[in-house]
Amino acid sequence: MTIFLKKYADQIGIAASGLCLVHCLLMPFILAFWLQADHCTPGTHCHDEGGGFQYDYLFLAFSAAAVWLAAGHCSRRWLKALMWSFFALLAGGVLLEPVFEGAHIATIFAAVGLAATHFLNWRFCRQCNPSSGV
């Protein structure tokens, strides 16, 4: 199982970042519909205060695992630093979103950055080891 996760860490990271980006971009539209349909009282942030499952933390957990596994086999220090920096921005954005209004923009930027750095790491890994079939 560990070999599978290490082999596909970048693809998992790209998928998790892409899903996080879709979630971040579509959530305002879902909330607008939710408010219009009287499922939530105006003036409250129903996404954070709802009794349902918080998908933000799930994306954060998948991203943490993918960055940790991908950075473990990354040979370029600058790329490893970028991955961890974008993850820190994502974590800060998710955790500070209820406090700061602009934190949502940081999560979108971080999701794009994580997907791009995972893609770069995946490409560099394929160039260094073409027989791996990754």
Image (cartoon, rainbow, N blue to C red):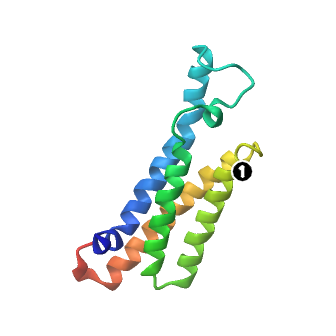
Query: Looking at the rendering, in which quadrant would you find the N terminus?
Result: bottom left
| Amino acid type of the residue that numbered disc 1 sits on in the rendered structure | Leu
Front-most of residues 10 and 63: 63
Residue 123 position within the rendered picture, expressed as x and y whole percent measured from the top left: 38, 73
Q: Quadrant of the C terminus?
A: bottom left
Compared with 92, 120 (above or below) is: below
Q: Residue furthest front?
A: 51
Front one among 45 and 117 = 45
Q: Residues within 10 Å of mark 1 (few under 14, many from 20)?
A: some
In the image, what residue occupies the spot 56% across and 61% down? 113
62, above or below 22, in the image:
below
Quarter holding residue 124? bottom left
Residue at (43%, 59%) from the top-left corner? 14
Residue 82, position as x, y percentages in the image? 59, 72
Tell me where residue 96 appears, x and y as whole percent: 72, 50
Task: From the viewer's perspective, tell me whether residue 11 is left or right of residue 90.
Answer: left
Q: Identify the residue at horizontal 53%, vertical 34% (top origin).
A: 52
Q: Residue at x 61, y 57 (%)?
A: 90
Query: For the residue labelled by badge 1, is the local secondary structure a helix, a strand or a loop?
Result: helix
* Residue 33 against residue 28 in the figure, above or below: above
Relative side of 49 to 58, left or right: right
Circle 1 residue? 96
Left or right? Give the position of 61 relative to 124.
right
Query: For residue 99, what is the image quadrant?
Result: top right
In this figure, what is the number of numbered marks? 1
Residue 80, position as x, y percentages in the image: 54, 77
